[in-house]
Image: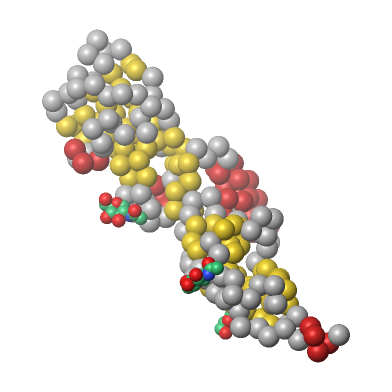
């Protein structure tokens, strides 16, 4: 019991701290170019560090660590098919011809599971139609950035202020309109196909 709560506390405390100050969110499996924040010159030497550990080192004519393909011509670092364990702090060190250290940018990169393509369920009520946005569950997230948010689109245009998982419309007024939903988190978004409802309004009969 006591041990479990210590572990829980540790997870809450330290994942919360770790997720603060994310400069950039990238979906797991995605690509990202870490900017250098400096225009690299041919005579510069460049080091990239990940969480303090050197992962790339190049002198003007010699490659000391890593592959030429790890960076772009401007010195930015290429990350492809990102894994969760590549989240962390990327820092660069550039020394010019005169050995002077140049100012560069550091990036605290956070990863999130990408959202999955949603589908829309349609429920016909007496005079209304309810569209429900559903998707396969996300892996359990442990920080607030994992939160999934919703948007609704009518004929491709975002409907302002509709951010719940379901959308209710008068079935008569929404005939022949296309509705779709979009799910997103801080790193990715996916749109459903669009749907037209086939609900018959019973409003006249009820009155
Ligand atoms: C990431 O980059 C690789 C190699 O350039 C490419 O094949 C892949 O399609 C890219 N992935 C995404 C999600 O853009
Ligand atoms: C949507 O419809 C599918 C298939 O009819 C069903 O399995 C699923 O539970 C429904 N989801 C919601 C959120 O109603
Ligand atoms: C709704 O979607 C259908 C099929 O994609 C399209 O032919 C139609 O023009 C769309 N209607 C509107 C109002 O956008």
Instruction: Identify whether 203 is placed above or below 19.
Output: below
Residue 54 appears at what percent x and percent y?
31, 34
Kindly indicate the quadrant of the structure image that contains residue 127. bottom right
Residue 15 drawn above or below residue 118 = above
Residue 40: % across, % down: 27, 24
Q: Quadrant of residue 61?
A: top left
Q: Is residue 99 visible?
A: yes
Using the image as rendered, state which of residue 62 and residue 159 is in the foreground. 159
Residue 173: % across, % down: 69, 72
Judge from the rendering whether residue 1 lies leftward or rightward of residue 188; answer left or right.
right
Q: Relative to 30, is 156 above or below? A: below
* Residue at the outermost top position: 98
Residue furthest left as drawn: 61
Seen from the viewer's position, the closer of residues 97 and 155 is 155
Q: Position of residue 98 (x, y in %)?
A: 24, 10
Is residue 180 at least partly visible in the picture?
A: no
Residue at 33% x, 16% y is: 101
Q: Residue at x 38, y 19 (%)?
A: 103
Q: Is residue 180 left or right of residue 114?
A: right
């Amino acid at each position: 019991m006591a041990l479990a709560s210590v572990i829980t506390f540790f997870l809450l405390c330290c994942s919360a701290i770790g997720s603060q100050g994310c400069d950039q969110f990238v979906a797991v499996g995605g690509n990202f170019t870490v900017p250098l924040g400096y225009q690299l010159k041919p005579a510069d030497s460049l080091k990239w560090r990940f969480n303090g550990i050197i992962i790339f080192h190049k002198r003007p004519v010699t490659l000391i660590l890593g592959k030429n393909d790890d960076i772009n011509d401007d010195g930015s670092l290429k990350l492809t098919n990102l894994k969760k364990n590549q989240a962390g702090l990327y820092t660069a060190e550039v020394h010019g011809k005169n050995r002077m250290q140049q100012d560069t940018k550091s990036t605290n990169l956070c990863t999130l599971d990408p959202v999955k393509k949603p589908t829309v369920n349609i429920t016909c009520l007496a005079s209304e139609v309810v569209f429900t946005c559903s998707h396969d569950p996300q892996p359990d997230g442990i920080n607030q950035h994992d939160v999934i948010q919703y948007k609704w689109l009518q004929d491709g245009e975002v409907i302002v202020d509709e951010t719940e998982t379901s959308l209710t419309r008068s079935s008569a007024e929404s005939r022949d309109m296309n509705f779709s939903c979009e799910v997103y988190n801080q790193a990715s978004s996916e749109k459903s196909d669009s749907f037209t409802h086939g609900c018959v309004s019973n409003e006249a009969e009820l009155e």
